Structure formats: structure tokens, C-alpha cells
Amino acid sequence: MDKKVRDDVIVKAKNIKLVIFDVDGVLTDGGLYFTDDGREMKKFNVKDGLGISLLIKHDIEVAVITGRNSVIVADRMRSLGVNHVYQGRLNKLETYENLKAALQIDDQQVAFVGDDVIDIPIMDKCGLPVAVADAHESVIEKACWILSKKGGDGAARQVCDVLLSSHDIKINGYEFSGQQ
């Protein structure tokens, strides 16, 4: 597989001011894990977390819009500095439109990373629709960019690195590349 991100994706990435991630299946592997006493557990990728923190540090807004509610998600996003956390949103498009209005940005300035059919309405509108490698077939068809990583396995970091690269951001002398 060609590891270089397509030029059209890089061009679109240069315009991005907000990246929105779905949670289950994008920031996690999509599994639902429960303890014997019924408490939910989720596994997040630490590299995804660092990428998200770096975006925020360099003035690229980050949001999550998810159909489920979870204290774990709220805690994880708070620890990363994500201020735009919307849970229990099966109609994600309404939340998307409200967030764009609040941040005074347009569709072409938004990247969205999804994995399942409830993500399609935003993917149809945003400037950079992205699908994780193991996304539902209909989501892959809508994506401008299909990641080589699965949800929860560094997919978010791929997006973060390309956004950092396209905005010419360097960290400790490291220049992010346009590679997947």
C-alpha cells in the first residue's frame, strides 16, 4: 500500500481549523468492555492522545461527537484538554452545525473522522471526511481519505500528524511528514 497521503488530502488539510472525532470505533477499537459488576471500560491509544493534545496546543480545535454517553469519555477528553465534547448525539449533524456556528467556521475548515453510518451526514458536509481502516463500507465510500490504521489503533494519530504537517508545525525539531 502506498504510504504517502494524496496531494488533495494535504491541500484540504491545510484549511482545517477543527477536527471532529467519533469515539467508539475511532478513538477506541469499538469494543464494549464491562467488569463483573457492570462498569464499562474503554481502551484509548496514548499516541492518539498525544496527537490530539498537540493539535490543541497549536490552535487546531478538537471535538468529539458520539452517540453513546460515558463518564470515561468525558474524563479522557478532559485530560487531553478537549473542550468540545458532545455525547449521546445520534443526530450528529445538528451538533456539527451548532459547533461550526459557535466557532465561526465553515464546512471546508472541518475534518471529521468516522466509522459507521450515523457519521455519514457530517461526512457529506465537511471539508475533509476521513474513515478509519475498519469503518463500515458505506463510510469508506464517503471518505476522501481512508486511514491505514483501525479505530483505537493509532488512526487518530495519523490524522493529527497530517494536520500538524500541513500546518508546518514542528515539535522539538521534529517535522511531521505527510506519510500515513
Image (cartoon, grey):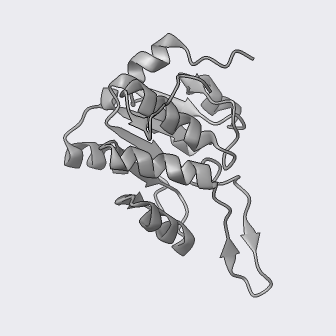
* Residue 70 % position (x, y): 55, 70
State which quarter of the image contains the C terminus. Answer: top right
Quadrant of the image occupied by residue 146: top right
* Residue 71 % position (x, y): 52, 74
Farthest residue toward the right? Answer: 36
Indicate left or right for 151 with 106 as reference: right
Indicate left or right for 57 with 158 as reference: left
In the image, is residue 131 above or below residue 23? above
* Residue 82 % position (x, y): 39, 58
In the image, is residue 26 above or below residue 130? below
User: Residue drawn 40% across and 16% down?
Assistant: 11
Quadrant of the image occupied by residue 140: top right
User: Residue drawn 69% across and 54% down?
Assistant: 30
Farthest residue toward the front? Answer: 173
User: Residue drawn 23% across and 36% down?
Assistant: 105
User: Residue drawn 40% across and 44% down?
Assistant: 55
State which quarter of the image contains the N terminus. Answer: top right
Quick one: 160 or 168, which is closer to the camera?
Answer: 168
Farthest residue toward the bottom? Answer: 37
Quick one: 78 or 107, which is closer to the camera?
Answer: 78
* Residue 20 % position (x, y): 43, 44
In the image, is residue 22 above or below residue 170? below
Indicate left or right for 150 with 176 as reference: right
Q: Is residue 138 visible?
A: yes
What is the count of numbered marks? 0
